[in-house]
Amino acid sequence: DLPLTVGLPESYINDDPLRVQLYRRVASLESEEQVQAFEEELVDRFGKLPAPALNLTYQVRLKLAAIKLGASSITTDGNRFTIRADPMERLAPQLRALQKLFGADALIGRKQVSFLRHGTPEQWKYRLMEVVKKLAAMIDALPPARAPQPRVEFTTDAPLASPARPIAQDDDW
């Protein structure tokens, strides 16, 4: 949902089946190292990466950072980015620090942060990536979340059992 031209242009890779195969590979990248290796391979085989290809690998990197954060979505609405992530709820005690870190244009909610997109595409792409990475780092720095303790309830609706009868002592004892 980012305002970027993304892809492997036909003018860069004119073999359609090969381009489809490369898109499949992009979809399977799972680490920064794999993204770098993919970029290096493209440069070796086809020359300098055009802007849409760089945007494609940027989106993969952003997706990897968002996964680390636990983000459910990164969206744009007009001139504003919104990052939604349930783990952000754990940062509630640090609300003022988040506001200071992300600036006056940031709107910080319980499970989301929103901020203005401004500057060149390179500037806002950098800021978006930094916000996602900083949120993930802040959450990683927190102590592990405690699992909720099961709640045990006792009811008094059942009648109490009668006290046990004493054992009769017979002659064999």
Image: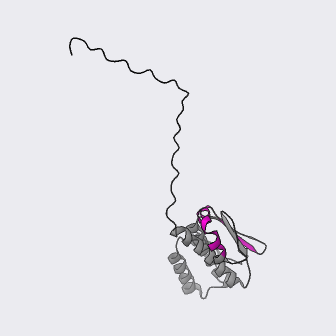
Residue 137, given in percent of the width and then of the height, sits at: 54, 72
Q: Is residue 70 above or below residue 57?
A: above
Residue 126, given in percent of the width and then of the height, sits at: 64, 81
**Residue lying at 64% horizontally and 69% vertically, measured from the top left:** 95
> Which quadrant is the C terminus positioned in?
top left
> Which quadrant is the N terminus positioned in?
bottom right
Region rendered in magenta: 78-99
Taking the image as shown, residue 58 lies to the left or right of residue 37, namely right
Q: Which image quadrant for residue 139? A: bottom right
**Is residue 2 something that shows in the picture?**
no
Taking the image as shown, residue 24 lies to the left or right of residue 9, namely left
**What type of secondary structure mainly makes up the magenta span?**
helix
Residue 136, given in percent of the width and then of the height, sits at: 57, 70
Going by the picture, which residue comes out furthest to the bottom? 48
Q: Nearer the viewer, residue 31 or 76?
A: 76
Q: Which image quadrant for residue 12? A: bottom right
Taking the image as shown, residue 128 lies to the left or right of residue 42, namely right
Going by the picture, which residue comes out furthest to the right? 78
Q: Nearer the viewer, residue 95 or 113?
A: 95
**Residue lying at 51% horizontally and 76% vertically, measured from the top left:** 34
